[in-house]
Image: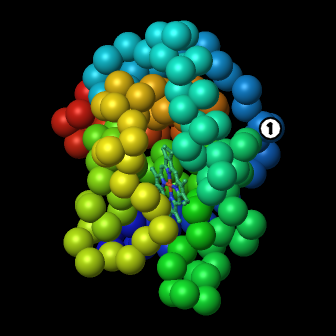
Amino acid sequence: MMILICAVVFSGLAAIAAHGQSQSTITRAEDLTVLGQSVTDEQITLGRQVYAQNCASCHGANLQGQPDWRRRLSNGRMPAPPHDESGHTWHHSDQDLFDITKLGVDGVVAGYESDMPAFKDILSDEEIAAVLAFIKSTWPERQRESQARVTGKDGGGS
Ligand code: HEC
């Protein structure tokens, strides 16, 4: 439910935030952490591969999400949102992103029907951290800073 509300409330904000910003291709690990640990270039390289093999089919090869991702599907479920700055991934703390990826959305929000699979039997914790590091490495400074603040409040590092 939290996630649904966030999606509605923040989609407007995200649109404003994304306005006027060019597509970012930041790939350096400097100043970036995931779950309180410094991100390395090797981690981003691994994360890019993990993303291509496990996430791109739904969230898009360029993290762009599914077409018309804000509109509920006919089965009542939500399409896969983008993981770039136009989505709302950056509104969640590192720990929440980790839990959603590992357990699926219904593993975090009991009873919520979602097409987001749980990756706990497919990816190791290290691979999940790496894919999050890769996703975070693509965000412009503003989204990175905002998400670092949310993560700080959540107690999961920056
Ligand atoms: C089979 C399609 C599919 C695959 C593959 C998939 N996802 Fe998702 N994902 C979704 C859908 C659909 C949602 C939206 C869930 C909802 O709101 O019901 C979602 C939501 C998410 C969210 C929450 C985003 C937010 O802002 O609320 C995260 C984080 C996420 N996925 C990460 C990943 C990662 C990382 C991978 C690869 C390891 C991945 N997903 C692979 C379909 C998929």
For residue 119, side relative to residue 56 (left or right): left
For residue 18, side relative to residue 81 (left or right): right
**Mark 1 Cα within 10 Å, few/some/many (few <14, many 20+)?**
few
| Quadrant of the drawing holding the N terminus | bottom left
Q: Secondary structure at mark 1?
A: loop
Q: Amino acid at mark 1?
A: Ser
Q: Is mark 1 within 8 Å of ligand 1?
A: no
Looking at the image, is 130 positioned above or below residue 89?
above
Could you tell me residue 7's position as x and y percent? 49, 68
Q: In the rendered image, which quarter is residue 33 located in?
A: top left
Residue at image position (61%, 13%) is 28
Looking at the image, is 41 positioned above or below residue 52?
above
Could you tell me residue 129's position as x and y percent? 39, 29
Q: Nearer the viewer, residue 62 or 148?
A: 62
Looking at the image, is 99 positioned above or below residue 158?
below
The answer to whether residue 103 of the structure is visible from this angle is: yes
Q: Nearer the viewer, residue 53 or 138?
A: 53
Could you tell me residue 9's position as x and y percent? 48, 70
| Quadrant of the drawing holding the C terminus | top left
Residue at image position (51%, 86%) is 76
The answer to whether residue 16 of the structure is visible from this angle is: no
Q: In the rendered image, which quarter is residue 49 located in?
A: top right
Could you tell me residue 101's position as x and y percent? 39, 48
For residue 64, side relative to residue 59 (left or right): right
The residue sitting at the left extreme is 155
Q: Nearer the viewer, residue 111 or 93?
A: 111
Residue at image position (53%, 21%) is 46
Residue labelled with disc 1: 22
Residue at image position (35%, 25%) is 126
